Amino acid sequence: MSTNDINQEQELDEYGEPLPKSKSQVKREMSAAQDLGKDLVGLTASILKDVPIDDTLREAIMQARVMKHREGYRRQLQYIGKLMRSADIGAIEATIAKHQQKDAEQVHFLHLTEKWRDRLLADGDKALNTFMDDHQDADRQYLRQLLRAALKDKKENKPPSNARKLFKYLREIMGSEHP
């Protein structure tokens, strides 16, 4: 749910006074806050520590994580939803979105590294020359050794341990250039 779903601006009457929220709107807001609270329960501890929430809400989230009984967990989520009403929903969503963006960038980087590994294994020296043009601080000789060993493993139907070593080295080289 987005901030607009939870904190929707109220309509004004003819005198400029806000109209009271409908019962349905209040329920939608409570449900959205509870859903966001459930998302917070599912976050890792390292991400949760960055989320701007008060200690009471943080403690309620930690309690929900260890609950085994389904009904107790459901009631705890309702309590978290109640606490979420006084929280800064926009800041919480912004923090979660920032971490999701970092995760997406990391996944993209790993996919790019995999593509380079596969390209090096498929095209050999031609791909190696292209890689070396883009990444000049890479050790060509070591890369060649890893490449030959990975190709030999593949030819002999051995486990791809050298292909993994090649991937790790590529990730190290490419990661040092793009923090």
Image (cartoon, helix red, strand yellow):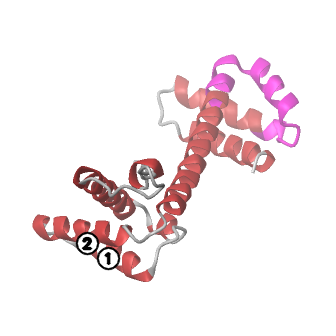
SS for callout 1? helix
Residue 61 in the image: state x and y as whole percent.
34, 72
Say if 134 sits above or below 36 in the image.
above
Q: CA distance from mark 2 to mark 1?
A: 8 Å
Q: Is residue 137 left or right of residue 161?
A: right
Give the numbered dot on residue 60.
1
Q: Report which residue position mark 2 lands on.
A: 79
Q: Is residue 86 left or right of residue 137?
A: left
> Residue at coordinates 83% horizontally, 36% vertically from top-left?
135
Q: Quadrant of residue 133?
A: top right
Q: Can residue 120 be found in the magenta stretch?
A: yes
Q: 133 or 18: nearer the eye? A: 18
Q: Amino acid at mark 1?
A: Ala
Front position among marks 2 and 1: 2
Q: 25 or 162: nearer the eye? A: 25
Residues at discs 2 and 1 in contact (Cβ within 8 Å): yes
Residue 32 in the image: state x and y as whole percent.
33, 54
| Range of magenta residues | 117-142
Give the numbered dot on residue 80.
none
Q: Is residue 169 left or right of residue 163?
A: right
Q: Can residue 127 be found in the magenta stretch?
A: yes
Q: Amino acid at mark 2?
A: Tyr
Q: Quadrant of residue 170?
A: top right
Residue 22 in the image: state x and y as whole percent.
27, 53
Q: Determine crowd level at label 2: few under 14, some 14-19, many 20+ residues with C-alpha closer than 10 A.
A: some
